[in-house]
């Protein structure tokens, strides 16, 4: 039945009616807040990410309390070590920054889920996500298989420190299987893996690399991160991660890849996370600061759209603000 029997505007007339028929809901319970933790005291601003700072462990614990009070169930942690080396040994050091931070956080806020980002790039002096071979001739490249052992060691160190979920973001082939085997061997059979399955080689990570000091010293990440033109390949990446034992799949960045998110959710039927990354955050912050966009409505529309495209979980630097805006008005 068409117009005039059907009038699409009928259900749009009042806020309460629009709310009743809304298909996609956004709640603090869907969000994950990322944090950067450093070995220095206090907080240090991140120029390209206004509102986000590098935090000391004490400040991180304070933030986790706020996140919990806002109804956000989980945090994603990135460690910035005092010293970096070619292997990224800080990643698996039991006294490394992220391990210390996880222990402190869980001791104070056991109910906050801690997702540990697992990668070598914050810990290597060359800024690549895996171990390098070659080099003298300027032809250094990331050695996939040699990197797997290091990633597996780091995963176990994170689990030992109390991480609730391990989230490998390195994009080495076979890392989910290697990490699963290492976790199981050490008794962490119940620690889930949230795999950055479709992680694209993206310009939108720019601000993050400032935050983590992880810009590659040479070259780029295109030999391990995905080509932005591909989405069939993303389905293959996701299927392989499922076979290797991933419990949650991730697409990253979010907004430029909503089609990929949709396809992975439809095809896999797995819990899927989307990472609304640093560059997406920076764009909104910059436009809002310039007065070009309204921050609140832009953020809520963006996060709702990411949910609508299939994300069960949205990782976003806007999480705390969004949770505040979503709080029911008494
Ligand atoms: C580590 C990692 C990166 C991000 C998350 N984990 C950076 C990269 O791959 O260069 C980016 C997150 C963001 O931009 O917010 N490999």
Image (cartoon, rainbow, N blue to C red):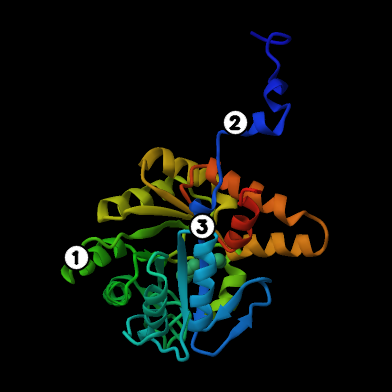
Mark number, residue 71: 3
Q: Tell me if residue 230 comes above or below residue 182 in the rendering.
A: above
Toward the viewer: 53 or 275? Answer: 53
What's the mark number on residue 184?
Answer: 1
In this picture, is 91 found above or below 327? below
Looking at the image, residue 308 sits to the left or right of residue 270; the answer is right
Residues under numbered marks 3 and 2 in contact, where contact means CB atoms less than 8 Å apart? no
Judging depth in this view, the residue of 217 and 199 nearest the camera is 199
Query: Where is residue 33 shown, x and y percent of the image?
Result: 52, 64
Q: Nearer the viewer, mark 1 or mark 3?
A: 3
Q: Earlier in the sequence, mark 2 or mark 1?
A: 2
- Image location (x, y in percent) of residue 220: 52, 72
Give SS at disc 2.
helix
Q: State the SS at label 3.
A: loop
Q: Earlier in the sequence, mark 1 or mark 3?
A: 3
Local packing at callout 3 (Cα closer than 10 Å; few below 14, some 14-19, many 20+) is some
Residue 144 location (% of width, % of height): 33, 70
Q: Is mark 2 within 8 Å of ligand 1?
A: no
In the rendered view, tell whether residue 314 sits above or below residue 74.
above
Callout 1: SS: helix
Q: Residue at x 70, y 59 (%)?
A: 284
Q: Residues within 10 Å of mark 1 (few under 14, many from 20)?
A: few
Q: Is residue 201 visible?
A: no
Report which residue position mark 2 lands on: 20
Q: Please provide percent x and percent y for residue 277.
A: 57, 62
- Name the outermost residue toward the front: 330
The nearer-to-camera label among 2 and 1 is 2
| N-term mark: 3 or 2 | 2
Question: Horizontal placement of 150 versus 142: left or right?
Answer: left
């Amino acid at each position: 039945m068409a117009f005039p029997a059907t009038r699409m505007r009928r259900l749009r007339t009042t806020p309460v009616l629009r709310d009743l028929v809304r298909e996609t809901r956004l709640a603090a319970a869907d969000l994950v807040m990322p944090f950067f933790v450093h070995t220095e005291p206090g907080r240090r601003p991140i120029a390209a990410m206004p509102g986000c700072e590098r935090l000391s462990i004490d400040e991180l614990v304070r933030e986790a309390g706020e996140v919990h009070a806002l109804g956000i169930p989980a945090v994603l942690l990135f460690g910035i070590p005092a010293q970096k080396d070619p292997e990224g040994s800080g990643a698996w050091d039991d006294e490394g920054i992220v391990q210390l931070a996880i222990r402190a956080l869980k001791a104070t806020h056991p109910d906050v889920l801690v997702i540990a980002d697992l990668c070598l790039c914050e810990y290597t002096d060359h800024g690549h996500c895996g171990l390098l071979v070659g080099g003298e001739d300027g032809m250094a490249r990331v050695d996939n298989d040699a990197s797997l052992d290091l990633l597996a060691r780091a995963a176990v160190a994170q689990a030992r420190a109390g991480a609730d979920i391990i989230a490998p973001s390195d994009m080495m082939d076979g890392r989910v299987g290697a990490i699963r085997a290492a976790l199981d061997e050490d008794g962490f059979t119940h620690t889930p893996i949230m795999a950055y399955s479709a992680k694209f080689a993206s310009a939108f990570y720019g601000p993050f690399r400032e935050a983590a000091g992880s810009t590659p010293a040479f070259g780029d990440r295109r030999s391990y991160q995905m080509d932005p033109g591909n989405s069939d390949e993303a389905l293959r990446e996701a299927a392989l991660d499922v076979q290797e034992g991933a419990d949650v799949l991730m697409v990253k960045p979010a907004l430029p890849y909503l089609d990929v998110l949709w396809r992975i959710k439809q095809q896999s039927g797995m819990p899927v996370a989307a990472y609304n990354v640093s560059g997406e955050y920076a764009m909104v912050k910059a436009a809002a600061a310039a007065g070009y966009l309204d921050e609140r409505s832009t953020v809520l529309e963006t996060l709702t759209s990411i949910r609508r495209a299939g994300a069960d979980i949205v990782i976003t630097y806007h999480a705390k603000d969004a949770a505040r805006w979503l709080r029911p008005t008494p």
